[in-house]
Image (cartoon, helix red, strand yellow):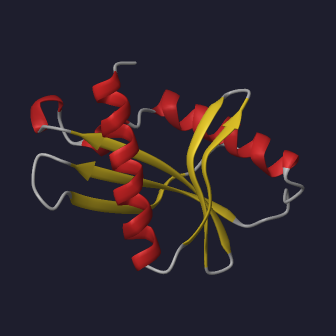
C-alpha cells in the first residue's frame, strides 16, 4: 500500500470517528487486528456493538466509496467480527454492520453513514 493511500485511509478513519462520535457512538477500538484482517472501527451505539467499515476516496473517479464494500468484503468483515466477539468474550452481544463513506475531494469531507448496511449469514 502506498503512503498516499495509507494517509487517505487514516484521514478517512479520523473523519469517520468524529462523525460517529457526533452521532452518539462510542468508539471502542480502531484498527482491531484479527487473523482475517483489520476491523476499521468497533463502536457502541446504544446497546448495540457496531462493526464499522470505512471507505475513503479522494475522487469520484472509481465510483462512490460505499460501492466498494462488495459481498466478498462483507464476508471478510463478518469473519473478523466473529473473531472479535469470541476473543473479547462478548459473543452474545447484539451487533450490526455499518459502512461510513468519506469523500475527501471536497472540504470539509463529505461523510455518509450507512447504518445496518449489511447482514452476515450467521
Residue 99 relative to residue 75: left or right:
left
Residue 94 relative to residue 64: left or right:
right
**Residue at point 42% right, 47% down?**
54
Residue 64 position (above or below residue 95): above
Quadrant showing the C terminus = top right
Q: Is residue 35 or residue 73 the one in the foreground?
A: 35
**Residue at point 37% right, 68% down?**
19
Q: Is residue 11 or residue 101 the one in the foreground?
A: 11
Residue 93 position (above or below residue 10): below
Q: Is residue 40 or residue 8 the one in the foreground?
A: 8
- x, y percentage for residue 2? 34, 19
Residue 74 position (above or below residue 41): above
**Residue at point 49% right, 81% down?**
24
- Total labels: the figure holds 0
**Residue at point 66% right, 71% down?**
48
- x, y percentage for residue 16? 39, 58
The answer to which quarter of the image holds residue 75 is top right
- x, y percentage for residue 76? 60, 32
Residue 62 relative to residue 68: left or right:
left
- x, y percentage for residue 63? 17, 35
Residue 62 position (above or below residue 82): above
Quadrant showing the N terminus = top left
Residue 111 relative to residue 27: left or right:
left
Amino acid at each position: 500500500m502506498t503512503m498516499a493511500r495509507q494517509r487517505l485511509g487514516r484521514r478517512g478513519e479520523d473523519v469517520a470517528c468524529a462523525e460517529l462520535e457526533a452521532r452518539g457512538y462510542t468508539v471502542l477500538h480502531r484498527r482491531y487486528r484479527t487473523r482475517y484482517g483489520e476491523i476499521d472501527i468497533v463502536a457502541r451505539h446504544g446497546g448495540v456493538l457496531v462493526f464499522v467499515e470505512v471507505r475513503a476516496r479522494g475522487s469520484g473517479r472509481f465510483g462512490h466509496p460505499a460501492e466498494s464494500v462488495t459481498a466478498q468484503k462483507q464476508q471478510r468483515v463478518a469473519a473478523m467480527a466473529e473473531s472479535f466477539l469470541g476473543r473479547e468474550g462478548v459473543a452474545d452481544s447484539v451487533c450490526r454492520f455499518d459502512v461510513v463513506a468519506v469523500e475527501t475531494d471536497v472540504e470539509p469531507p463529505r461523510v455518509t453513514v450507512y447504518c445496518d448496511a449489511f447482514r452476515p449469514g450467521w
